[in-house]
Structures are given as structure tokens and as C-alpha cells.
Amino acid sequence: MNLILRHVFTAVMFSIALTIVVTGLTLVAFIDDWSLVFEQQIGDISFLIIVFTVAIGAGLIIGTVTGFYWRQRIHQVERQMDEIIKGQRITFHMETYKDLEAIQRYLHQIQNKIRSQTEHAQRLASERTREREKSLQEVVAQERNRLARELHDSVSQQLFAASMMMSAINDMNPPEDETMKKQLRMVENMIHQSQLEMRALLLHLRPVALKGKSLQEGAEELLIELTQKVPMEIDWKIEEFTVDKGVEDQLFRILQEAVSNTLRHAKATKLHVMLVERDENVILRAADNGIGFDMEKMKTGSYGLQNMQERAYEVGGSYKVVSVPNEGTRIEVKVPNLGKEGENND
């Protein structure tokens, strides 16, 4: 039973009860012969039927009005709670209802507490990032660079040469046997996929810290490098804004993970990246036109997706992935940008 029906039912029952009480008291106080009341008619309708009909009608009207009245106020509270969940500021209307002032005050306190906890989480992430950068061992970074350099100079070059040779064989001197021709095409595709896997591996091996660069600078360098090395149409929209160092680091790692997943699994020909700030939220979105996957059958143990989700939650953000088989995948991370507020409060 919804809110309006409950109010209507309550008002009707109250009206009937009140009518019975008032009618009973009237009969006891002023009328000796009660049979006259039952025999009394207005037109051709019994007096008692008219009395109870009026009571029920009044109950219906009062119940409907009060039901709509309270439903409107409850919807206002629901909208404000939805704004809190989405990380938006609560909008208080000028004609705030006095009977909801206490609830709205509590909602405002909850929002301030959530924002304070999010800001605290971002500060902790920033501190951990600074400590991690200070304690980073140079020998580890050098070893990663050396390994990535050797893989690029040896395996990557050999895969590139093999790919060129297979393309030349298939295009210039294809075999007459259709089975052999099909197998050579499969070998060429396997080499091409291995190149993408190698580029994704090199992307993981490179140092993931921004090292003095802004998030926008690091993201643009990464995407420009990909356009030069990957046969994929890549475009991006990156706007200028400031955000805490810890948030920058986590968003850059999420972008690397998303790009790596696209190279290894998506079989995509297009990749679009967006990094903007809207309504005090930093939004990072990566969308491809690859093979996608079934969201219902997605493995809960997918390390890449789980890793991105954990990084987003670590800085108080939200994480959403939408994928449709044969239509592509879109990953979106939204993080409240509280850095400016922290500066103003200081």
C-alpha cells in the first residue's frame, strides 16, 4: 500500500469513527426515540446513509490531500539523498518545509561528514604517494627500464620484422593452396596480437609514477606514444584543472590499466579518452569499440577491473564499467576534487 492510499484509508476510517461517536453522543443527549433517526429521510435516501456518505467523502478528500502533501515532501528528501549518493551538493529550496528542517539539517551534516572523509582519504593517498616516491628504490626503476628496453630492442623488433615478412608473403606471393593461405593469415594475425601484447607489457614495465609531470601531461604523452606505435585510431579530450597529487597518481595508473586492457583484450580499432572536471568532480573515461564482454558473465576475479575499482575507491571516487558484446567497453571513474576546498580552508 503506497503512501497516498494509506493516508486515504486512515482519513476515511477516522471520519467514520468520528461520525459514529458524534452521532451517538447526539442521540444520547437530545433524542429519546432513536427509531426516528433511522426512519428519517432526505429525499428518498436515509439520513444515516447521507451522514456516513459525507463522512467517507470528507475522509477521501482529506486523505488524498494529506497523502499528496507528504509524498511531495518525501520525494524532496529522496532527491537530496540521491544528490548525496552522487557526490553532488544538496540543493535547498527557498520554500523549505518547516516539518522537514530537522531532516534536511541531518542530511547536510551527513553530506559534510562524507565530504570530510573523502577529503581525508585523498590526503592520505597524497601522503602515501609522496612517501612511495621518496622510498622508491632507484635500482628497481633502472631494472624495469632495462628490461623494457631489451624487450623493445629484441622481441619487439623481431615481432615487427616477422609481421612485415608475413604481410609481404600474404600480399605479394600468396600460396595457391587455400588451406595454406588461411593458415598464413592466422599466423599473421597471431603475430599482430603478440605485438599488441608486447606493447601492453611494456606499458606495465615502464615506471607508473608521473615524476613531476601533471596528470594532463602524463596522459597526453602516453596517448601520443600509443598513436605512434599502435595501429589504432586514438583521440582524446583533456582539459586543464588542478587536483591533489595522490588523485593524479591513481587516475594515471587507472588510465594505464584501461589502455593496457584495451590493447590485450578488446581487439578494438578506436579508443577515446576523456579527462575533464565537471561539478567539482574529475571524470576519467576510456571507451573503445572492441569485442566487449557480457557483464553478467564477467569474472569477479578480473585483476585489471578490480585493480581500477580499488584505486578509484582509495581516493573516494566511483567506478563504473559498461560493456556490450561486439559493441565495445566504456570505463568511467569519477573522483570529487576537494583540493581547491582544502586550499581555501587553509
Image (cartoon, rainbow, N blue to C red):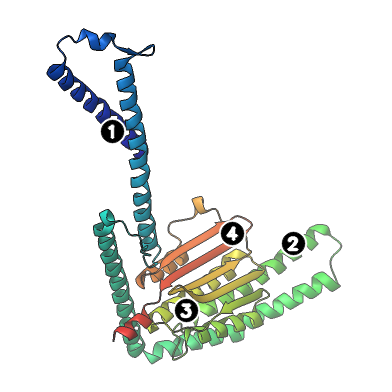
Dividing the picture into quarters, in which one does residue 95 lie?
A: bottom left
Q: Secondary structure at mark 2?
A: helix
Quarter of the image containing the N terminus?
top left
Which mark is first along the chain, 3 or 4?
Answer: 3
Label 4 or label 1, whichever lies nearer to me, is 1
Residue bearing the label numbered 4: 292
Amino acid type at image mark 1: Thr
Outermost residue on the left side: it is 29
Q: Alpha carbon of mark 2 to alpha carbon of mark 1: how far? A: 78 Å
Identity of the residue drawn at 33% across and 42% down: 66
Q: Residues within 10 Å of mark 4 (few under 14, many from 20)?
A: many
Label 1 or label 3, whichever lies nearer to me, is 1
Quarter of the image containing the C terminus?
bottom left
Residue bearing the label numbered 1: 10
Q: Alpha carbon of mark 4 to alpha carbon of mark 1: how far? A: 53 Å
Q: Give the left or right position of residue 80, taking residue 105 as reference.
A: right
